[in-house]
Structure formats: C-alpha cells, structure tokens
Image (cartoon, rainbow, N blue to C red):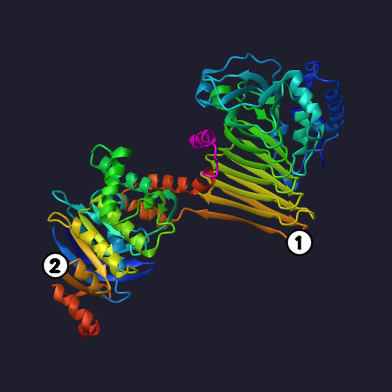
Amino acid sequence: MTQLLASTPFLASFKASESGAFEDIPLWLKEARRIDACWLDSFELPSFRDEEWKYTPLTSLWRRSFDLVERLDGVIPEQLKPFLIDGARNVLVLNGHYAGEVSSLPAEGFAGVTLLSGGAAYDVFKDGRQYFSAVTRNDAELFCRLNRQFLQDPLAILVKPGTTAQGLVHILNVVTSPGVVVFPRIFIRVGQGAALNVLQSYLSLSSLTGGPQLNVPVTDIVLEAGGGLEYGERHLQSVGSSYIGAVRVWQKSDSSFKSMMSTTGAGIFRSNISVMLEGAGASAQINGLHDLHAEAHADSHTFLEHLAPDTKSDQLYKCILYDAAHSVFNGRVFVRRDAQKTSSYQLNKNLLLSRECRVDTKPQLEIMADDVKCTHGATISQLDEEQLFYLQTRAVGREDSVGMLVRGFMDDVLSTVSHPLIRKALMKG
Amino acid sequence: MLKIKDLFASVEGTQILKGLTLQVNPGEVHAIMGPNGSGKSTLSKILAGNPQYTVDSGSVEYDPGGRSFDLLGLEPDVRAKEGVFLAFQYPVEVPGVPTSMFLRAAYNAVCRHHGVEEMDPMDFDVFLHEKMKALDMDDKFIDRAVNVDFSGGEKKRNEILQMAVLNPRLAVLDETDSGLDVDSMKIVSSGVNKLRNKTNAMIVITHYQRLLNYIKPDFVHVLLKGRIIKSGGPELALEVENRGYDWLVK
C-alpha cells in the first residue's frame, strides 16, 4: 500500500508555516513552486523495496514534524567560533539563511570572486535556470523539489573568467534551533579558465540545538571551460539530526573538479554527489571519508556521468566503522556512447572495528562507449592483527596502535586534498 | 636477565616448543641455530608476546635490572616498554603510517612508561638522524610509510634503527641476516655491535654461521624439535656449518 507524502505530519508541519512567508521571491520562482507543489502533493513515499532508499529508510522522518525558521537573529553563537577558519572568507548560513560574513581577519586571494545574496542571487539563479531546475539521475528528487519549494535567502558565488582565487571561501552552515528544517541553496559558477576553493562545514551539534533537525541543502556548481574548483565538505552533525544533501556539478571542457567529503554521520545522513562531465577533457576527483561511531549512519551516493570524450573520473571513498555504525556507499559511473577515451576509477574501502557495525556497498559501472578504461571495486576488512602486534612490540599500546592504523587507513584519502586550509579543517574532524 | 624454564608452546594447535630451557645474563650474546621448523621463530614470537602463539607450560622470568617480571604475563607493548625488543624476520608493512611519526610514538611511549619527559619533534629529529647515519640510511627513508615499498635490506635496516631508538635490554634478532647481501650485513651487524654493552643482552637467531662472524656470540645453542639439544661456544656454530645438524641427532 502506498502512502502520500501530503498525508504525513512531515510535510504538513512546515507547509503550514510557509504561507505568506516568501512574498519577495521573483515571479519565475513562484511559478516553478506552483508546479512543485502539485508534484509534492501527489508524491508517494518510497517503500522499503525502493532501491534508492533500501539501506537508508526514511520512515522515522515522515512521522516527525519540523518548523521552518523564517527569521534569523543574526547573532553568532560563541560555540561556533572554533569552527571559523583564519585566513578564509567565512560565510555564515544560519538556519538555512545566508547571514553575511564573519571573517575575523582580512582574507586575501579573492580577486574576481563575488558573493551575492537576496535579489542579486535570485537573478543569478534565473540566468542558470537549466541548472536550478534540473533533476539529475542521482538526485533524491523529492528533496531537490522540497529545497526549491522552501529555500530562503540563497547564496551565489561567481568567479570572473581568467581569475585564480588562491583563498578559501568557507561556508559555515549551521542549524541552531531544535525541531527545524532548513533548505540552504548555493550556486557556484567558476568562469572560463578561473579557479576557486570552497569548503562547506555543516554543523548541527546537539550542544547548540538540543533537538532533532533536518538539513536539506542543494549546492549547484558550474565549471566553465578550463575552470577549476577544489571543494570540501566537513560534516559534524549529531545523531539526533538528519542531513539529506545534494551537490550537482556540471563541467565544461577541460574543467577540473576535486572534492573531498568527510563526515561523522548523523541519524540519517545522505550525500548525493552528481557530476556531469559534459565537455571533452573534463576531469573529476570525488573522494570521501565516513568516520562513524556509536549509532551514526552515513550514506554516500555518487554519480559520475561521462558525456564527452577524453574525460576522467577518480573516486575513493573510505569508511571506518565503530560500534553499531552503518555505512552505505553507492557509486555509479555512466559512460555515454560519445565519451570515448574515458578513464574512470572507483574504489570503496571499508574498515570494520566492531562486530555490530554494518556496511552496504554497491559500486556500479554502465558503459556504452567501446574505447574506455574503467575499474571499480569495494573491499571490507578488519584491522590486521600482524600490524597491530608489530606496533605493540614497538611499545605502542593497543589502543594507540589501533588509532595509528586507523589514521593510516585514512591517510591516502585525506592526502588527496591540496588546499592547506581545507586539509587542516578536514583533518581536525 | 632471562630465565626460560621448560617451555612448551603451540601455534594453531601444533606444539612447537617442547621443553626449552635457556638462561641469558646481562652482557651476553646467545646465538640460536637450528633447521627449519625447529622452533626458532616460535621462541622469538613467544618472547615478544604474539597472541597467536600459546604457552602450554613452563615459565619465562625477565629481569631488566633490579626488578623481576613474569614475562609471559605482560602485554606485548609493556614488554617493549620494559626493554624487550624483537627484530622481525619479516618486518610488517604499515601503510599510511610515516616511519618518523611511528618511531617518535614508540620512543615517547617508553618515556611515559618510565615517567621520563617525552622528546619534542625537533630534538627527536636530531636524535633520529644520528641513529640513521650509523646505519647508513637515507633521509627520505623516514618520510615513507613503515616498511611500505622498502627493499628486503631496507626493512632489516629499519628493524635495527628501531632497536637503536628503543635501546632495549634484551634484543631478539630473528634471522636478521636473511635477505641481506654482504655489504648490508656488515652495516647491520656493525649497527648491532654498537648497541652491545655490559648491561644488555641479545639472542641472535640464524640459519647460518656467516652472521656470527660479524656479531660474535658468547654462546651457541642448537635447537631441534623444540628443545635445545646442544650448547657450546662460537666453535659449535662452525661445526654446524661444516657438518650440518644430522650428527647431533642420535
């Protein structure tokens, strides 16, 4: 038997608070929302048979109600200060709303970079409507539409063609109230031959919020010909919180995208990263780390679509599981008929440190071109007793030896990060 | 320093050591020779505390100076902290763990155990480079992950470097000569000899007399079927080299 989303406490709760709240949005978006509203009303909830949500059931979500936060107080909680990054442009997104910059030091290396919010951001979204309205094959479509329907105060970042920004834009995405749902929306366009570095930190610490909340962000990235972006995501979320986020990347010829996502999981954690390699010579590196303790859950769905010749993709996801943690990896690579001379490499490695933890991993390849080089694989292992013994015979206690081996396991994925500030932030956890 | 009494030990249900007795005093170097499967490596693993090996009966008393321990009752890392060192026959590769970081962690773990101040990274770097120089080791060595992509000779040198850093009371060298060419063997042996003094002791396990030309033992023991069947001076090693083990079995 199917159940409609419209009949759940989930949708009803924040739909009610929406009425009349976003009158200052542009007409084109209002129209798009009207269509989405009909779609949402008739949306049937995914069942446990639905492959996309088989290992990440959402049942607990539908039963819950959440509030939209309409206003923000603009005060930066003292607890957030340790998460700001010196030397970066720290951009605050508070409860889903763009809330300005909070850099303590003057940041350098941002020539050609423009941050836009309010009406100016909506104008950028309108220019890039094919991206804004797109639903990729990897999107959790429901959540993309929910984001479009309920987003408030989005942010746009533009990099002028031919400018290389050495500095780091750090977007601190924080939920501070209990029982809320937030829909952050960010659009990044890197101009022809330009380059940028971006780190997003998602914080929903129970020390801040003291209750469950749901974060549904969408980040759209367009890399024009020869453009480059190093992108990082750092997730520090409590087990009481849920995160269902999408990153969608469209790459023109010879552009390069490099991303590293690090998470300690959440109650429900789902990261959907989709990369469309549309231009010849484009390359993408998608890496991730799940470091899960206690009851934490993390699900990474990656999607690499090779649409043009001579495109390259490289994926490495490493997962470490303690206690009763649960990790899911689903990696899909599609090579279209025109994408000759493509090379694609995908690997998911899991390290199990308890008997109660669980891993579901599914690397997938679908190739329609005939002249390609593709590999994929997954491994699941435990700590090597010989290595542990070796370290112990060198006076290192068992616990420290385990720590050393775990850090060693993470090392190759963390060392793929080039930007020093991103690397430092991700290593700190 | 070390008193092994009537030791019986097994691995995976097969008894390998069958009543081994050996005493080692401070300042002594004991060589243990024996054919394949005689229990040489089992002895080294038992002394270091490898959990895959079980002691069926017997005792091992260890006295690093002033205090006496039931060695078999200590965790492997505590044995190391109290001065027991095993140079592995097959050093283990540890991907992702840089050698320099590993060595400093090891050194400082011993410091903490004895309530001595830990060494900071700068001082340790100087200390480590001195030790490396003595073993004719390249600087790049310590930036690489422990034993990963090391040649056979480099791995053995790395073992002796660790020994030099930890400065053990009792060192067990398990076939340190295997896989070494003559030049490497000279370097490794001279490294070992520099660490020899009146307060420490060594057990050198080897197949061949050759190594004993460089690391000169005070005593030589022949191990066969889990027991020491003959003990003597350095001349016993030469005799084994010439005549094999058969004449010892009657």
Of residues B132 and B229, the one nearer the viewer is B132
Q: Dot 1 surroundings within 10 Å: few (below 14), some, or many (20 or more)?
A: some
**Chain of the residue under the numbered disc 2 shown in the image:** B
Same chain under badges 2 and 1? The reply is: no
- Name the residue that disc number 2 marks: B218
What amino acid type should be assigned to the residue bearing mark 2? Answer: Asp
Q: What element carries label 1?
A: loop
Figure check: A233 above or below A303: above
Q: Can residue A91 be seen in this view?
A: yes
Determine if the magenta segment contains residue A112. no
Magenta-drawn segment: A415-428
The x, y position of residue A409, in whole percent, is 49, 49
Of residues A49 and B124, the one nearer the viewer is B124
The x, y position of residue A194, in whole percent, is 66, 35
The x, y position of residue B146, in whole percent, is 40, 53
Figure check: A80 above or below A417: above
Determine if the magenta segment contains residue A425. yes
Residue found 59% across the figure and 40% down from its top? A260
